[in-house]
Amino acid sequence: MRGRLVVVSGPSGAGKSTLIKEALAEVPELAYSVSATTRPPREGEVDGRDYFFLSRGEFERRISEGSFLEWAEYSGNLYGTPEHPVEESLESGHSVILEIELQGARKVHEKRPDAVMVFVRAPSIEETQRRLEGRATETPEALEQRMTTALTELRALEEFDVEVVNGDRGVSREKFIETLREIVRGGSDAERA
């Protein structure tokens, strides 16, 4: 049986990575797709685990070869999903979760309309800003750009099958994991979490 493709998107600071990491530990039928990027690694990130860190030239070469399921430029860096590993996992019966920004999510949905689209957001725009500031990885200009992008992304909510509001309580985590379990099992009822 072929696995299902799950696309998780939402503004920076929504907590997507944390939720996905916890879900992967709880849902063994779910595989994580490692994205490629031209941005430099953040402290603690490992090439091949967190991202495939590529030079802009190498990334552009792979674009020209058609190696990505989707790719987009976000905050001055290129991001993309290598297609071959995703397809291999789906064919082997594993569901695959992609964590990608809005442009990429739209491209995947165009190419794979059967993908389940999950939108994760913080409880408020103020909380989004607080979380981004708490990272202390952004210049003031980059933070402002991410906040502008977050407002645009929030307007795309109706394009998604499932919404998860990631608050500070464990309820969001449990709801996210249960939603993914249902998707992996083949549940077709999209719900708002």
Image: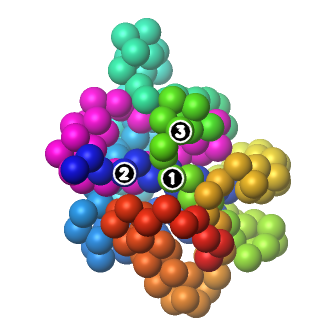
Q: Residues within 10 Å of mark 1 (few under 14, many from 20)?
A: many
Q: Secondary structure at mark 1?
A: strand
- Location of the C terminus by quadrant is bottom right
Q: Position of residue 28 (x, y in %)?
A: 23, 68
* Front in this rendered view, residue 94 or 104: 94
Residue bounds of the magenta highlight: 81-105
Q: Position of residue 124 (x, y in %)?
A: 79, 73
Dot 3 corresponds to which residue?
113
Residue 92: in magenta span: yes
Q: Note whether 154 is above or below 89 in the view shown.
A: below
Which amino acid type corresponds to the residue marked 2 in the rendered image? Answer: Arg
Colouring used for the render: rainbow
Q: Residues within 10 Å of mark 2 (few under 14, many from 20)?
A: many
Q: Is residue 193 rendered to the left or right of residue 82?
A: right
Which amino acid type corresponds to the residue marked 1 in the rendered image? Answer: Val
* Front in this rendered view, residue 166 or 38: 166
Q: Quadrant of residue 123?
A: bottom right
Residue 75: in magenta span: no
Q: Secondary structure at mark 2?
A: loop
Q: Quadrant of residue 191?
A: bottom right
Which amino acid type corresponds to the residue marked 3 in the rendered image? Answer: Pro
Q: Position of residue 26 (x, y in %)?
A: 29, 76
Q: Which mark is residue 116?
A: 1
Q: Residues within 10 Å of mark 3 (few under 14, many from 20)?
A: few
Mark 1 and 2 residues: CB-CB less than 8 Å, in contact? yes
Residue ID at (65%, 72%):
192
**Distance between the alpha carbons at the discs numbered 1 and 2:** 8 Å
Dot 2 corresponds to which residue?
4
Q: Position of residue 36 (x, y in %)?
A: 40, 35
